[in-house]
Amino acid sequence: MRGRRRQWTDCGRGDGVSDDSIIIVGAGQAGGCAAAALRDAGYTGRITLIGKEVHFPYERPPLSKGVLSGDVALDTVFLRNSDWYESSRIEVRLGTGIADIDRGQKRVIAENGETFFYGKLLLTTGARARKLALPGSANSEIIYLRGIDDAFLLQDRLRPGRKVAIIGAGFIGLEIAATAIKLGCDVEIFAVAPGPLGRVMPDEIANILVRKHADNGVRFRFRATVSTVDRQGSRILLRLADGESTEADVVIAGIGAVPNDELASRAGLDVSNGIVVDEFGRTSDPAIFAAGDVTRHYNPLLKQQIRLEAWQNAQNQAIAVANVMVGGKLPFAEVPWLWSDQFDMNLQIAGHPADWDELVWRGEPEDKQSMIFQLMGGIPVGAIAINNARDMRFARQLIARAKAVEPRLLADKAYKLQQLCS
């Protein structure tokens, strides 16, 4: 659903806009959810949603899976259709980048020179794919999957029999690998780390993922540093730091994301690998809020500042912050949760543990359905479920509860986790 470029009049004080009008900069999932939440909360003032992409707000998780494989229709990823924004009196300006924030005049200035005044401002500018800094990488057609247009470009390249090289063994790399195999490609993953997902996963889970991918034909090159990427005719040559080289038809990089916090930084807001906000989404300026991937927010349950790149955070934090902007008092306080689908495996992860001193399996590692708990001093700080969404709800409650649990009860599949949550 590409956006029509609407010719709204400037949201300036000269056209009668009141100072309590709300502008949302960033029309991704967080921005779209926030706009809807404002209306759901009864806000009747003017809402302007401004986005640099030409598409209406959509969900990104399906891009590396169902959309890329062609199994999911594109129109299913959009949060709402264009008519909804019209009927909800939400002005949408797509294809419009914002260059600066003038906090003194309470206005944002677009790259095309247009000016929009606000009473309150919400920044949901998200994150962008981290780019490789390698000789030749700028001219070698490396693909980064972040948006709809990237998914269509990659979908066109993933033809049966093509050799695909993926740089990075994080979630995006693993998900693309699974989809590429499904489409009949020959896939090899290169990663500097000794295993997939870095410190996010215990080795026990990482090993299961490697076996699952290997069983489906994916090859891994761990501790492999790609030093140069060059176009060689119709193919791309990757040279490794150890002197080896390999050719591929398609090269994809999934090496993380960078928060789009430059706009906030130029405006003098507190920024530290993301826009720094409290549990209510408030920045260092009382008229400016932020939500979604771009934020480094305080989580009251974890008692620390964290930055998350997850569907749950983009949606729920945006809703919580939108409610605060119109008088709500509740903080955003949830146990982080994300999921990943790879082949026939659904992986769900809860918590944000920096460390743990004990791992407890609920089920066996080789089981098709199992769960592993990460404990620190007997307290569950993280949980990872394999094809076990049913227990994840209660695992999150145990993490939020932050009380010690008998490991033997966690391990006993006959003992219901629900009983431990009371």
Image: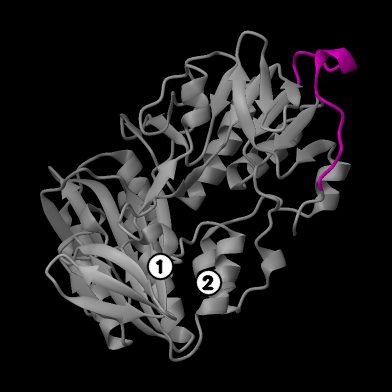
Q: Is residue 373 left or right of residue 368?
A: left
Res. 390 in view: no
Identified at 54% across, 42% down, the residue is 316
Q: Is residue 178 left or right of residue 105?
A: left
Mark 2: amino acid:
Leu
Q: CA distance from mark 1 to mark 2?
A: 9 Å
Residue range corresponding to the magenta coloring: 5-21
Q: Is residue 132 left or right of residue 143?
A: left
Do residues under tags 1 and 2 come within 8 Å of each other at their CB atoms? yes
Query: Mark 1, residues whose alpha carbon is within 10 Å: few (<14), some, or many (≥20)?
Result: many
- Residue under numbered circle 1: 252
Which of the 4 image quadrants contains residue 193? bottom left
**Residue nearest the observer in this picture, 379 or 339:** 339
Q: Which mark is residue 50?
A: none
| Residue drawn at 20 percent across, 63 percent down | 225
Q: Position of residue 15 (x, y in %)?
A: 89, 17
Question: Which dot marks residue 154?
Answer: 2
- At 22% from the left and 76% from the top, the residue drawn is 245
Q: Earlier in the sequence, mark 1 or mark 2?
A: 2
Q: Is residue 212 above or below residue 388?
A: below
Determine which quarter of the picture holds residue 156: bottom right
> Picture coordinates of residue 31 (x, y %)?
63, 40
- Residue 183: say if magenta: no
Q: How many marks?
A: 2
Instruction: Measuring from the top left, give residue 147's x and y in whole percent.
Output: 56, 57
Q: Is residue 204 above or below residue 71?
A: above
**Residue 88 position within the rendered picture, expressed as x and y whole percent measured from the top left:** 83, 40
Amino acid type for the residue under numbered disc 1: Ile
